Amino acid sequence: IALILDFGSQYTQLIARRTRELGIYCEIVPCHTPVDEIRAKAPRALVLSGGPASVYAADAPHCDPGVFALGVPILGICYGLQTIAARFGGTVAPSTRREFGAARLRQYQTSRLFAGLPEEFDVWMSHGDHVVQPPPGFTVTAQTEDALGALEDPARQLYGLQFHPEVVHTPLGRDILRNFFIGIAGMRADWNMQSFVEAAIADIRARIGPTGRAICGLSGGVDSAVAAALVAEAIGDRLTCLFVDNGLLRLGEFDEVLATFRDTMHLNVRGIAAGERFLTALAGVDDPEAKRKTIGRVFVEVFQEEAARLGQVEFLVQGTLYPDVIESVSVKGPSAVIKSHHNVGGLPETLHLKLVEPLRELFKDEVRAVGRQLGLPEALLRRHPFPGPGLAVRIVGEVTPARVALLQRADAIVTEEIRAAGLYDDIWQAFAVLLPVRSVGVMGDERTYEHVCAIRAVTSQDGMTADWVRLPYDVLHRISRRIIAEVRGINRVTYDISSKPPATIEWE
Ligand code: XMP
């Protein structure tokens, strides 16, 4: 294992992803983790991430000094480099001008970190401070026009990069990371999905035991489906899955996905038709957060009633992913609540169940790879993400059964046309939003006064940022024409051209 000490950089997760892409398993820990905890994980290499602070600032984050005596190779990136430099007697100072963006790096001392790389190559810089005086014993191995680019003390196994090898704008960054983990730290590239699946199944068996029983709520999405498939692989029918129809799913989705779970994945699954109950609870509720809370509360009630019918169950399976885990341990502290996404957060407490979270260490693309390894249908693995509160957050204002029906039909047309144009797999999410606004139209000789529907299609890596898709005009044209012709109650279609930030992906 390699450990990444997080000093608060926006790129820390990217370092972890790049490392795993090389076949090296790694985890992120907060920078101030005590050295004993770090030693207990027996890391073969450490990376000190970047961070927003200045090393001499009073509240600057530091790692446990014991980290430098562990005897494993350490790579400092940006702030990580500066913290090494400051600790070993170098000098760090604010740059006269911030270096941000592409830069040309020139090597002028051979370094194992740059083995096989050309003498000059492009790197991505993003820093205010830089090292003006390297610490005694360190060699500067590369330089950009404006600043020191890399330094090292191979005898003490300390390496530092001022630029960011983890971002795509450093095209050779991957080679540098490979040189560090494999060339310098002598690690083996043996992390792959098959080894993950085998280890995860063994862990699940050990945790649940030979007779324990578990329950899992399926949302219809990838994460819970893959988590359930892994646990089912480990304990068979001692896992019961519940798939709740909250009445806010896409058109035909409940039956389709239920059939996939049952017939293709052979899960022990119960479908619970509870749409009416959710829609009744939502009557008169128009605030987005109130909708989420209402849906979350009814979900817990329904889930609890069903769980009670199963008799003795000790474990709850959840598809928590690594980004959620990191959010909760990060040095940055909890960020402001923009939307309360975790609508099933109350389950473990109210049910007194022990959690099983087999995907806690994985990123989304790794979850898909595990799903593939387990033979899950490609159509399920590639499905666009769908919010837990479903169409409720795509109906601006009050949710009524009639509005859900309208939106389901408009949404189905969007998906059909996007698929027909061969664009589905290139898009993160594409959907329709029903607005409470009515507008005047004319159909034949008649005046109409009906709903406006907005189309939203975005690309994204992780849902944190997103850009609107430049859909071809003819695709937009077909979507608009079909919705207005086929969905009685909508007479106008608009296209949402906002990016995230400052807009969010969903309208509520
Ligand atoms: P936003 O709208 O915040 O969405 O840009 C980012 C991603 O999260 C999904 N989303 C949700 N998922 N419960 C969920 O499970 C929610 O309440 C929720 N709100 C948004 C959204 O679909 C997008 O993929």
Image (spheres, rainbow, N blue to C red):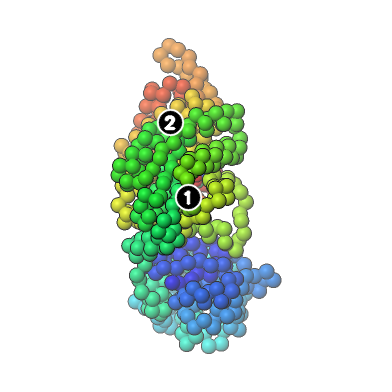
Q: Which residue is drawn at 51% across and 75% down?
A: 40
Q: Which of marks 1 and 2 is in front?
A: 1
Q: What residue type is labelled 2?
A: Gln
Q: Is residue 234 visible?
A: yes
In the rendered image, residue 109, in percent from the top left (x then y), is placed at 43, 83
Give residue 177's quadrant in the image. Answer: bottom left
In the image, is residue 262 above or below residue 136?
above
Q: Which residue is drawn at 40% across and 80% down?
A: 184
List the single residue furthest toward the top: 445
- Circle 2: element type: helix
In the image, is residue 42 above or below residue 477?
below
Work out which quarter of the rendered image holds the N terminus and state it: bottom left
Alpha-carbon neighbours of circle 2 within 10 Å: few (<14), some, or many (≥20)? many
Q: Residue 1 carries which label?
A: none
Name the residue beneath numbered marker 1: 313
Alpha-carbon neighbours of circle 1 within 10 Å: few (<14), some, or many (≥20)? some
Position of 227 with respect to 395 (left or right) is left
In the rendered image, residue 350, in percent from the top left (x then y), is placed at 57, 47
Name the residue beneath numbered marker 2: 408
